[in-house]
Image (cartoon, grey):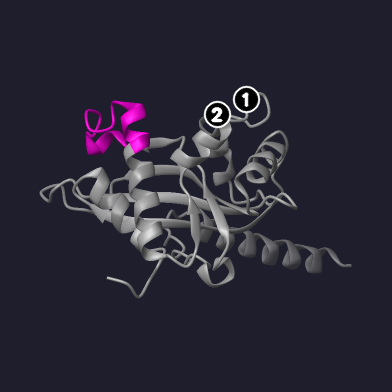
Amino acid sequence: MTRRATKLLQGKYFLILLASLSCGGKKSDQQPTPAPTAPLPTAGLAGQRVALTPLALVAAEDSLHWETLIADRRATLDKSDSIIATLLTARAPEVTWVAPAELRRIARRAPGIAADPDQMGTPFLRADNIIDVPDPLRYQLRTLMGLAGGRYVLVPAGLVFRKPPNRPTAEPPVAVAELSLVLIDTRIGKIGWRTTARGEGDDPWTALTRAVKSLTPGLP
């Protein structure tokens, strides 16, 4: 290859590199659009017992100033569990839901065999790349469902309250509740469905209620 041809190729590659850097170096001011909430697959769960594990993680962005509203962790978790279980029971009655309170009673009747549902460490299931549930959680869920009856477990893996992007500061502190959910087949130890349910509200409980309602579209 001649020296002239080499210089031409080098110049061409430099222009391509410069163009790619100029495009990639600019940060978009727009927030990424979140994935839509996937409806709860109630058709496949109809007539089955499905356990609903207790929520173990609740967090809120500092900009919301909701520290006093969710300061009592145990009360916040219990109220969140109650809202989730009540709405799912009312809006998806074709499924026989085993609520967190019942799971706790089942576990207490089998000390040394069943794990405490509040201590199973489920928040890590929020990660999108997890498909296979690792032990000891896989064993704990399989054992618990062996006592409760049924095959599937719906895990609320985390609840986070965020400030909506591009919201004018003059408006009320509306927040978006993001409820991460995964459905686990305990017989094979795999996650078969996951989504993040979202809902807005001026307080945590309104936002959470709207998030859970988004799982069953078509209902008021």
The location of residue 203, given as percent across then percent down, is 21, 45
Question: Could you tell whether 121 is left or right of 99 in the image?
Answer: right
Residue nearest the viewer, comparing 109 with 10: 109
Question: Could you tell whether 217 is left or right of 110 in the image?
Answer: left
**Res. 200 image quadrant:** bottom left
Q: Which residue has dot 2 on it?
A: 108
| Label 1 secondary element | loop
The location of residue 212, given as percent across then percent down, is 37, 57
Residue nearest the viewer, comparing 57 with 66: 57
Q: Which residue has dot 1 on it?
A: 111
- Whether residue 189 appears in magenta in the rendering, the answer is no
The location of residue 91, given as percent across then percent down, is 37, 64
Q: Residue at x 54, y 72 (%)?
A: 43
Q: Against 113, is 47 above or below?
A: below
- Whether residue 65 appears in magenta in the rendering, the answer is yes
Q: Image quadrant for the C terminus?
A: bottom left
Question: Could you tell whether 7 is left or right of 97 in the image?
Answer: right
**Res. 87 image quadrant:** bottom left
| Label 2 secondary element | helix
Dot 1 amino acid type: Pro
Number of residues whose C-alpha sits closer than 10 Å to that of mark 1, classed few (under 14), some (14–19) or many (20 or more): few
Dot 2 amino acid type: Arg
Say whether marks 2 and 1 touch (CB < 8 Å).
yes
Question: Could you tell whether 63 is left or right of 131 in the image?
Answer: left
Q: Residue at x 38, y 71 (%)?
A: 217
- In magenta, the rendered stretch is 61-78
**Identity of the residue furthest to the bottom in this view:** 218
Q: Residue at x 55, y 66 (%)?
A: 47
Q: Image quadrant for the N terminus?
A: bottom right
Q: Is residue 150 visible?
A: yes
